[in-house]
Image: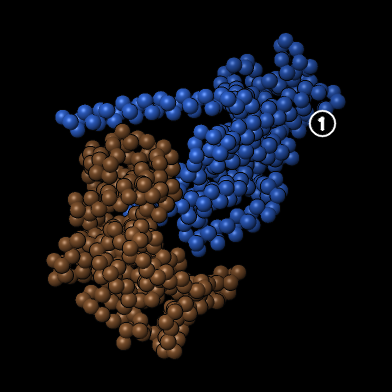
Amino acid sequence: MNHQTNRTLDPILEVQNLKKYFPVTGPFGRLGGIKGQVKAVNDVTLKLYEGETYGLVGESGSGKSTTGRTILRLTEPTNGKVFFQDKDIFQASKKEVRLLRKDIQMVFQDPYSSLNPRKRIGKILEEPLMIHTNVNKNERRERVFDILEKVGLGMEHYYRFPHEFSGGQRQRIGLARALVVNPKIVICDEPVSALDVSIQSQVINLLQKLQDDLHLTYLFITHDISVVRHISDRIGVMYLGNIVEEGRNEDIFARPLHPYTQALFSAVPRTNRAGKRERIVLKGEIPSPLNPPSGCMFHTRCPFALEKCRIEVPQRKEMKQDHYVACHLYE
Amino acid sequence: MAAVKEVERARTIKASLKKQERQLFFRRFFANKLMVMGCFIFIVLGLIALIGPLLVSYDPYEMKVAERLNAPSGEHWLGTDEFGRDLLTRIVYGAQVSMGIGLIVTLISSILGLIIGLYAIYYAALDHILMRICDGLMAIPGILLAIALMAALGPSPLNVIIALSIVFTPNIARIVRSSALVIREQTFIEAMHAQGASATRIIWQHIAPNTISPLIVQATFVFAEAIISEAALSFLGAGIAAPDPSWGNILQAGKLVIFKAWWMVVFPGLAIVLSVLGLNLLGDGLRDFIDPHSSGKKSK
């Protein structure tokens, strides 16, 4: 929200031309040769400024989760650079990466499988402290009590097992686990998609409150447009491994430029009947990332596709300050 | 002060939770009658093996030709063998050998199997090597492999343990690997990676505890099988050599005089049957006991 002031600062995290291709192999694994590549993430460039929330939206299979996981090197990148504190994460050694993970934490989508069923909550939350710090047991316990309180749980939950909690509470625990080591950046991979709508808003409000209290930077990955609109300062729209449009929340919702963004936003139901607008329904399915279309990735489904779109890959253009689009319609 | 109070309160909460868990545990444990019976048989046999030698009054090695092949009587409860040794004493000492070898084999193959299974799923290259070796060992029938190994190593209690451990380790490794594979794909393992946890921490603190229950169940079956295999090896003359008593070689001696002295085959046979029955009942019960789907108490 304090967006303008950040503009002058350097980004806290900078992703440059990130590519992640998954090899497709035959029945003999890699021995049988690589049959093709799934281009899950294809040239993603984005910057994260301190204290902001960057919303990454896109439909299933657009590569948004893979982007998040690759930044943390939970999967090895194919190509690209990620700068954090003037250091390329992709060049760092295994040991350095482990240290970096103190500063960049992740919250996962599934609150049920993301907690070890055999460990008590206290143990789960103390573990990051055991990995990254060498504070003693009492201090660890105190910090865990502290963080439990911050995420809206109590110390009476310290000795409970994960199965005794509801989905929303588990997600709070997952959040507490990410925050207990005081990270700078939290990558939230669809943190509310598995929750009921009423719980969703609670968790989102909690995320916002914690951001203010602890000065966090979020990379918020979701497919839910209304969530992203509520929480994000800037938004990147992903389609088939590419960011097709990027801009400030208010700009991008006021005037979506890319035809895909327009179609995506028009699919969000609105209560306000006065502002009637055309519903853009896209034809067909998202193409296979195994064999993505030539030229502009979106030309197979774009209602405004030109001849040029089939051949040439559109470049990223700044249409307005901080509002970028990659589309041939805006030349 | 407030923090101390909080810690105190948390401790009392922990104590009450532990008590509840313990009560639930015992209620569920005693609900399964067959398992309790198996457990009882197993404990009794274990006690016989442990303190039995102190209770019997004969020497298991002392031969009395005058008393050979006496039928069960007040003096010799289970009769005497072809050298006039008290059969009860022989079986009690044999229990020590048979159950002891069974226990040691179970422990060794469980630990080795656990290590192999866990590291195999964590390192893909290791997986191919270790699992192909396991496949190779499992392709040969267990008892045949054990006989072959004993032929190569020569009969002695230590070699029985080595041979049987080699036979049973692949079984355990397979079981551990299959359950660890499921655990490895769970999000909480990825979360631990994202936390920056080391491989050792992930393997031993997060994957291993989740594979222990199937491992324990399998271990009870391995225990039973090890007792049978040891008896079979001794029966065939490849295991414990006479005059050291083992259920298998008492049985073998009894085979020669089966029409004259039925007690020589019935009692050691009964000991083998009882121990295996007890362990299998225990293992079957444990499987139901540990499997959360059968209890309906927990959802996951």
Q: Position of residue A21 (x, y in %)?
A: 44, 73
A36 relative to B39, above or below? below
Instruction: Name the residue at 65% across, 52% down.
Output: B138
Residue on which disc 1 sits? B256
Residue B229 drawn above or below residue A252 = above
**Horizontal and vertical percent position of residue B228:** 68, 37
Decide if residue B266 is on the left or right side of residue B170.
Answer: right
Q: Is residue A313 visible?
A: yes
Which of A301/B14 is in front?
A301
Task: Please give the name of the residue rendered at 56% of the width and 21% of the height, measured from the top-left corner.
Answer: B51
Q: Residues within 10 Å of mark 1 (few under 14, many from 20)?
A: few
Q: Locate residue A301 relative to residue A200 in the image: left or right.
A: right
In the picture, residue B37 is in which quadrant? top right
- Nearer to us in this view, A132 or A163: A163
Q: Position of residue A181 (x, y in %)?
A: 25, 51
Q: Residue at x 55, y 57 (%)?
A: B130
Residue at mark 1: chain: B
Q: Quadrant of the N terminus of chain A?
A: bottom left
Which corner quadrant holds the C terminus of chain A?
Answer: bottom left
Q: Secondary structure at mark 1?
A: helix
Mark yes or no: residue A101 visible: no
Q: Amino acid at mark 1?
A: Leu
What sort of colour scheme is used for the picture?
by chain
> Residue A274 placed where, x, y %?
33, 63
Indicate the colour of chain B.
blue
Chain A representation colour: brown
